[in-house]
Amino acid sequence: MGYTVLSLLLVGLVISDVAFSAVVTIGGIKQDFLAFHNKARAQHVDTGALEWNSDLAKEAETYAVELTNSGKFQHSSSNTRPWSGGVQGENLFTGNSVVFQTQPVSLCMTLWYEEGNRFAFNKAFLYNFKGIGALGHFTAMVWRDTTQVGCGGAYKDTPKGRVTNYVCRYTPQGNIPGNFHKKVMKLKAGFEFPSKDDKSFFKSSGFVKCENAAAWNNYCVNTVAKFPEFCEKYKDSLDGNCDKTCGKC
């Protein structure tokens, strides 16, 4: 399933292809993605912790870059993500920052997990017939039989801000029709879901700073030259968060 900060996958997102894209290094996001998935799963009965799979993470990163370069926001075809006789599950996130910051993993995970507020556990069998709709990020996160996860990210700067895309892949995959009432377990007593605006449920180090000097050099040459007002307009934000642009790369 996929998100923008302001819209769902069902709405979609098209981004102008005016600048370079670069990866959000897996090493910088692995800890948060794994810890946050397992914090969420630990709130549910009979739901074990996930292990990180580096191959899944690399494939997730590859698709995040593909999405970012294309400006599209859609799930990959299932036949492009085979895994051990089945396919990889997939969650998507996209968000835009007008102050050119890479979106934190905590925001992505909060928006996915808070969907659980609207999951009808006492009528979960109905999802086997009507589909899971806009709650599929949550169910993929906590699917009881899933044991491995790997996530990757990419970003691109446009005149309207920085677009960040995150992709997580799961095995065995979840969201299998006929199993929602058996594989999405209820909350343990005393636990609850975060709200969309909850900034404390998942705590990370915040926005990921700029990386990849070669990519930023390409950005400075090709994009800042087209938009000379860019550096001055966003000087304070860039100085505080992006140390490799506007003459610094």
Image (cartoon, rainbow, N blue to C red):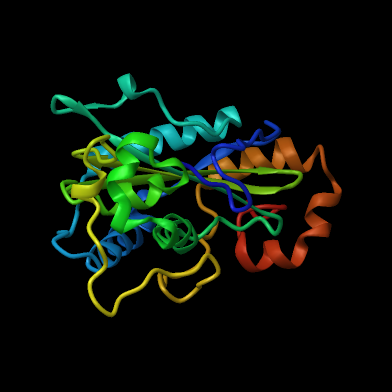
The x and y percentages for residue 142 are: 27, 54
Pick whichever, 31 or 117, lies toward us. 117
In this view, the residue farthest toward the right is 229
The residue drawn where x is 56% and y is 38% is 21
Pick the residue in front: 239 or 165.
165
108 left or right, relative to 151: right
Q: Does residue 132 appear in this view?
A: yes
Image quarter in which the N terminus is found: top left
Number of labelled discs?
0
Nearer to us in this view, 163 or 193: 193
Relative image position of residue 212 (x, y in whole percent) = 50, 47
Residue 18 spot, x, y in % from top left: 71, 33
Residue 89 in the figure: left or right of residue 208: left
Whether residue 58 is visible here, answered yes or no, is no
Q: Where is residue 193 shown, x and y percent of the image?
A: 39, 69
Compared with 196, 88 (above or below) is above
Tell me the residue at 45%/76% (across/down).
Answer: 200
Which is nearer the eye, 86 or 148? 86
Quadrant housing residue 8: top right
Q: Which residue shows up at 52% across the image and 41% down it? A: 22
